[in-house]
Amino acid sequence: MDILIKNALILTMTGKGVGAISEGYLGITGNKITAVGPSIELPAQAMEKVKTVIDARGKVVMPGLIDGHIHAMLTLFRGLAQDMDDWMHYGLAPYLSNLTEAAAISGAALAAVEALKNGTTTLIDFGFPMPSICRIYEEIGLRARVASLITAVPIQMEDLPPGELYSFDEAQGELLFYQNLALIEEWHNQAGGRITCVLGPQGPDMIPRELLLRIKQAAEDLGVMIHMHVAQGDRETYQIAKRFNCRSIPYLHQLGLIDKNLLAIHLTEATEEEIAIVAENGVAMVCCPASIAIIDGIVPPLVSFLEHGGRAALGSDQAPGNNSHNLWNEMKLAALLNKVRYRDPKVLPAWKALRLATVEGARAVGLGDQVGSLEPGKLADLIIVDLQQPGLVPYLEYPVRNVVPNLVYAARGHEVETVIIDGRMVIENRRLMTMDEEAIVSQAQEAARSCAAESATKILALNKGPAAMMHDGLI
């Protein structure tokens, strides 16, 4: 073994629950898990050949977290589009028009650091400029599944008032489709297989029908998934109804896109009938509970989707309208919001939320054969969480193990002590081992200040949301 972790409470996420092993050990050789079991069964001779031994008494060892949907490039705009209507048009878009490529890369690097330090080992990113962002993920050590954003709607969303039918820029759509294909050619299965690619149409309302059909065909030819916002809001529903006299999911069903190759993001506006259609046809869902709660005031239909047998993951989405890339936050809010929605404390229990962020999330995004659980033969993507942090004490195993509820309802991310990805120590004792964290944070802060200054005139003239609150002395 290259790494041996012993005396830990191991949550393997195998079986139907969390697969707990008390006083367990886990061995890593190269980039794979080679042994898992009770420490009492650890052969004495195995200790003699281990390069690194970690005594994890008082700690949890569990699979790394899977963030099923993130717009890392937008992280520079954290906290700038909350508590308002039409957040995309009047909150985000005025800043986005001044986002340079260098600034977007700085934002993605910041998101990567934040996600890693909170225990995310795999993320599904959706944006631009993806080739440069892939280089960040390669260097920092993340596992990433990436897509270049494809849209035929002009990027300057503030020029498209809500309620008006979009005018497609077909040349832009073609260019961005080509860029996504080029990304796949350059980066699919790179960095030792850590970086893989998918196709990323922004949404059915933002892609001409003919281009969407070509994206579908390309996905089939290349053997990659389609990662797309679906039924994400009333704006999309309105646009599809005006163009095709139907709703998004029936429209996509007509085009043959409602199948196991689709990773559908949000499904916020889906009806019960539509949820049944997507789940029963093998579509996977990514639920972003914090983002949708903040920007729409809606609880996505996650529980209904699961009841129909659907595969689902959790995602942090974007920092302008969520504020964090922290899967502990998403687990807690997914559980709490659905308990409130159904007025039932038994809905979406902690163990289920933890599975959505690990083993079930990995299956949903198409990586279930590689990561998401701790068992021999799988890639060594795992985290060590310190249960001795005040917010997780006491940790008990008898008569009831309280660790899983406390992880989901109390952990904040700082309790993640160690992050191992592909058998490599990426975070050790809360310290990033692969890149200069201080420089990343400093560069992102400076890039955000510059972009904000460039956007100030437009933001103040709009006087919407946070800008209006600031004008009134409220924030």
Image (spheres, rainbow, N blue to C red):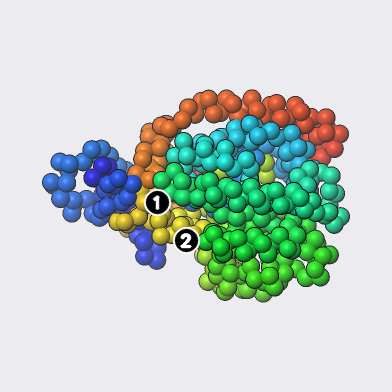
Query: In the drawing, does residue 20 fall left or right of residue 69?
Result: left
Task: Please name the residue that numbered disc 1 is placed on.
Answer: 63
Q: Amino acid at mark 2?
A: Arg
Q: Nearer the viewer, mark 1 or mark 2?
A: 2
One can see residue 368 in this view: yes
**Res. 448 image quadrant:** top right
Query: In the drawing, does residue 306 fall left or right of residue 320?
Result: left
**Res. 279 image quadrant:** bottom right
Q: Position of residue 94 (x, y in %)?
A: 78, 38
Q: Position of residue 64 (x, y in %)?
A: 42, 48
Name the secondary structure under disc 2.
Answer: helix
Task: Kindly identify which numbered label has been placed on residue 363.
Answer: 2
- Above or below — where is 131 with respect to 266? above
Measure how far apart labels 1 and 2 are at the Cα level. Answer: 13 Å
**Could you tell which of marks 1 and 2 lies nearer the N-terminus?**
1
Q: Position of residue 298 (x, y in %)?
A: 69, 57
One can see residue 317 in this view: no
